[in-house]
Image (spheres, grey):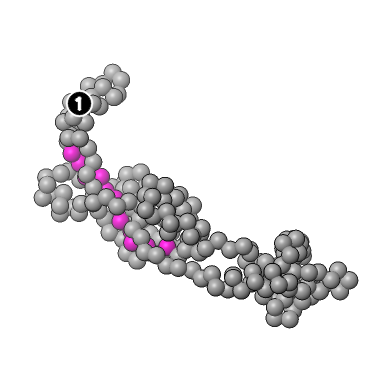
C-alpha cells in the first residue's frame, strides 16, 4: 500500500479532525544480537535432581542431604515425596534412608545428558513503544533513510542494555515469533527456558507508512 492510499484510508480515523499532512517516516528500532541459551524441559526439578545425585553418591540419609544443601526440611520432604510417588526412589521410613530405583537411575542418566544449546538470534526493541520482538523484515540504516529521503522519527527508548531484556518479555517475543513462523516450530518445541547474553547492539530504522 502506498502512502497516498494509506493516508486516504485513514483520513477520517480521528473524530472531528481533518488530515492536513502526511509523509513517510522511519521508526527507530534497536537491533540486538543475542545468544539464547535453550534448555530442554527435564522430568526432574533442580532439587529432585540433586537429591538423586546425593543418593547415587552414597549419601542416603535425608538429614545429611538437607544439611549439605542448606534447604529447609519442608522443601526436602516435599521433593522426596514426589520422587517416591514417581517411583524414582524407595524410602526406608525407619532409618530415613533413600534408595534409587531402576527408574530413578534412568531419570538421573537422562538428566545428565540434557545440556544447554546456544542459538544466535536477532531481537528488536521498538524505539517508540519499547516492545521486544523477533522479526525477519528488511530494516534500513540511517544512511539508507537519507538516501531514500525518508524522515527518521526520534527514538523515545534509550539504547537498551542486557538488563532491559526481562525474561518474560523475551519469552513472549519468542513464543509470538514461533506462532507466526511455522518453519521455526520444530526448533522452538525442543526448548522451554532461555537465558540471554548480549553480543552487540545497533540502531536500525524500517519503513513506516
Residue most extreme to the right: 94
Q: Quadrant of the N terminus?
A: top left
Residue 165 position within the rendered picture, expressed as x and y whole percent measured from the top left: 42, 56
Residue under the point 13% across and 49% down: 146
Q: Is residue 32 above or below residue 57?
A: above
Residue under the point 10% across and 50% down: 147
Residue most extreme to the bottom: 58
127 falls in the magenta region: no
Residue 6 position within the rendered picture, expressed as x and y whole percent measured from the top left: 21, 31
Q: Is residue 43 above or below residue 96?
A: above
Is residue 187 something one can see in this rendering?
Answer: yes
Chain part drawn in magenta: 24-36
Which residue in the protein does label 1 denote?
8
Question: Number of marks in the image?
Answer: 1
Residue 102 figure quarter: bottom right
Residue most extreme to the top: 16
Residue 2 figure quarter: top left
Amino acid at each position: 500500500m502506498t502512502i497516498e492510499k494509506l493516508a486516504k484510508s485513514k483520513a477520517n480515523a480521528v473524530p472531528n479532525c481533518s488530515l492536513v499532512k502526511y509523509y513517510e517516516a522511519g521508526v527507530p528500532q534497536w537491533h540486538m544480537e543475542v545468544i539464547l541459551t535453550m534448555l530442554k524441559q527435564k522430568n526432574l526439578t533442580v532439587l529432585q535432581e540433586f537429591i538423586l545425585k546425593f543418593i547415587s553418591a552414597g549419601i542416603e540419609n535425608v538429614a545429611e542431604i538437607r544439611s549439605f544443601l542448606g534447604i529447609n526440611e519442608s522443601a526436602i520432604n516435599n521433593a522426596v515425596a514426589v520422587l517416591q510417588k514417581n517411583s524414582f526412589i524407595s524410602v526406608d521410613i525407619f532409618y530415613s534412608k533413600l534408595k534409587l530405583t531402576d527408574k530413578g537411575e534412568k531419570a538421573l542418566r537422562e538428566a545428565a545428558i540434557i545440556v544447554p544449546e546456544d542459538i544466535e538470534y536477532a531481537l528488536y526493541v521498538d524505539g517508540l513503544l519499547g516492545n521486544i520482538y523477533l522479526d525477519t523484515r528488511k530494516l534500513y540504516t540511517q544512511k539508507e533513510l537519507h538516501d531514500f529521503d525518508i524522515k527518521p522519527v526520534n527514538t523515545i527508548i534509550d539504547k537498551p542494555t542486557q538488563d532491559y531484556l526481562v525474561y518474560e518479555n523475551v519469552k513472549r517475543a519468542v513464543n509470538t515469533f514461533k506462532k507466526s513462523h511455522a518453519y521455526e516450530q520444530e526448533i522452538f518445541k525442543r526448548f522451554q527456558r532461555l537465558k540471554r547474553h548480549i553480543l552487540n547492539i545497533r540502531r536500525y530504522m524500517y519503513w513506516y507508512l
